[in-house]
Amino acid sequence: MKQFAWLRATRSYLLPGATLAAGVATLASGVLPVPAFGDLASRTIPILAFVLAMSLVTELVDEAGLFRVVTDRLAALGRGRVFLLWLLVVAVATVSTVFLSLDTTAVLVTPVVVLLAVHARIPPLPFALTSIWLANTASLLLPVSNLTNLLAQDRLGLSPLRFAGLVWAPALVGLLVPLGLLWLAFRRDLRGTYGPQPAHPIRDRTLLKAAGITLVVLLPALVSGLPVQYPALAAAAVLVAVFLRRRPSALRWSMVPWRPLMLTVGLFMLLEALHAHGLTSLLAGVAGTGESLPALLQLAGLGAGAANAANNLPAYLALEPVAGSPARLAALLIGVNLGPLVTPWASLATLLWHERLRVLNVPIRWGGFAAAGLLAVALTVPLAVLALWAVSGMP
C-alpha cells in the first residue's frame, strides 16, 4: 500500500513539475527575456505569497476544528429541514469562496457538507454540486476570491472595494442563476426532514479560539486596502506559532501547496514567453475590441471556452493583454471565473473537489456534470455580461 501511495504522490507532481521545468527552460534558453521575467516576478511574487499564506491559514483553521464546529452549527440551525440546511450550506460556501478563495471551498467546505448530508441520510449530490458550482461562480466579487481576480486587480490598480464596485452586478448573477438551476434540478431531494446530528468533540478549545479570532481579524483586513499578502502572512505566522506551542505534530510540509505553486509559476513563465513572441497579436484578432455588449460577450465567451478547453488560469493569462480596459477585464473574469463548469480540468478547484469526493466514495458522472455545467454556463455568462454592461452605462 505504501508503494501505491508513493506512486500516486509521484504522479500527482508530474504535471506541475513538468510545467515548472518548461517555464525555467524558457528563461534559461532566452525564449523568456530576462527583463520580461523581472517584470513578471515583481508582479506575481506578492500574489504567490498570498496564495501560500492563505493555504496555510485555511489548513490550520481546519486542523483546529473550526469547519467541524461550523458544520455542527449548520445541522442545528437547519432545524431538521433539508431545504433550510441547503440554504445554510449555500451561505457557508459563498462566504468561504468570497473571502477565502474557491480552492478553500473545494478542499475544506466540500468534505464537511457532504459528510453532513451523508450522516443526515440526505442525498449528497446536491450539496457536493452546490459546493463546486459556488466555488467557481461565487469567486468574482473580491480580489482574494480567485487568483485571476488578484491578477486583474494588480493590472487595474484598484482597491478591493473599487474592484467589488466594478463586478458586483455580474457577481450577483453568478450567485443567483446557478442557485436557481440547482434548486430546479434537486428540488425533490431538498424536501423533507432530517434527524438530530451528533456534535464533533472539540480537541483543543485554545486552538479553536485562536483560529476563530484570527479569521475574524483577517477577513476585514483582506478588504481594507492593504496589500493582501501582508495580513495573510501575518495570520499564517500567528497560527503557526500557536500550533508550535499547542500541537506541533499537526504542522506538516504537505500543508504547503507545492503542486499549485509549481503549476502556477510554470504557467506564468510559459504564458509570458508566448506573449513575448506574438501571442497577444494572435489573440487580438479573435478577442474583438471595444466595450459594446457584443464585444464584451465575445471576450467572455472566449474566456469561458478557453477555460474549459485548458484551464481558467492560462486562459486568463493568455487573454489579459487583449482586455485593455476595466470593462473588458471584468468581462474576461466573467468568462474564466463563471465559465469553468463543464470540464473537470477547467479549474484547479474542480480537480481538488473531485479528489475529495473520491475519498468520500461519492461518485460523479462526468457526462451529467458536463451537461448540467454547459446549461449553467450558457445562461450565467451572458446574463452576467449583460449585468456588467447595464450597470456600467456603456453604449
Image: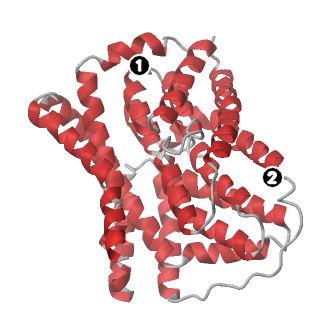
Check the image and report above or below for 235 versus 151.
below
Q: Position of residue 355 (x, y in %)?
A: 50, 60
Residue shown at the point (59%, 62%) measured from the top left: 110
Check the image and report above or below for 340 versus 91.
above
Q: Position of residue 325 (x, y in %)?
A: 46, 21
> Is label 2 in a helix, a strand or a loop?
helix
Residue 3 as seen in the image, left or right of residue 386: left
- Identify which residue, 39 or 108, lies in the foreground: 108
Q: Quadrant for the C terminus, please.
A: top right
Q: Position of residue 212 (x, y in %)?
A: 53, 74
Q: Residue furthest left?
A: 29
Sequence-first disc among 2 and 1: 2
Residue shown at the point (65%, 45%) measured from the top left: 369
Crowding at label 1, few (<14), some or many (≥20) Cα neighbours within 10 Å?
many
- Picture quarter containing residue 230? bottom left
Answer whether labels 2 and 1 touch (C-beta < 8 Å).
no
Q: Amino acid at mark 2?
A: Phe
Query: Which mark is on residue 124?
Result: none
Gap in Å between the C-alphas at discs 2 and 1? 40 Å
The answer to whether residue 172 is visible is no
- Identify which residue, 208 or 260, lies in the foreground: 260
- The residue tagged 1 is 322
Residue 278 as seen in the image, left or right of residue 328: left
The answer to whether residue 201 is visible is yes
Residue shown at the point (68%, 53%) measured from the top left: 130
Q: Select label 2 or label 1 by which is in front.
A: 2
- The residue tagged 2 is 186
Q: Quadrant for the N terminus, please.
A: bottom left
Residue 134 as seen in the image, left or right of residue 248: right
Q: Amino acid at mark 1?
A: Val
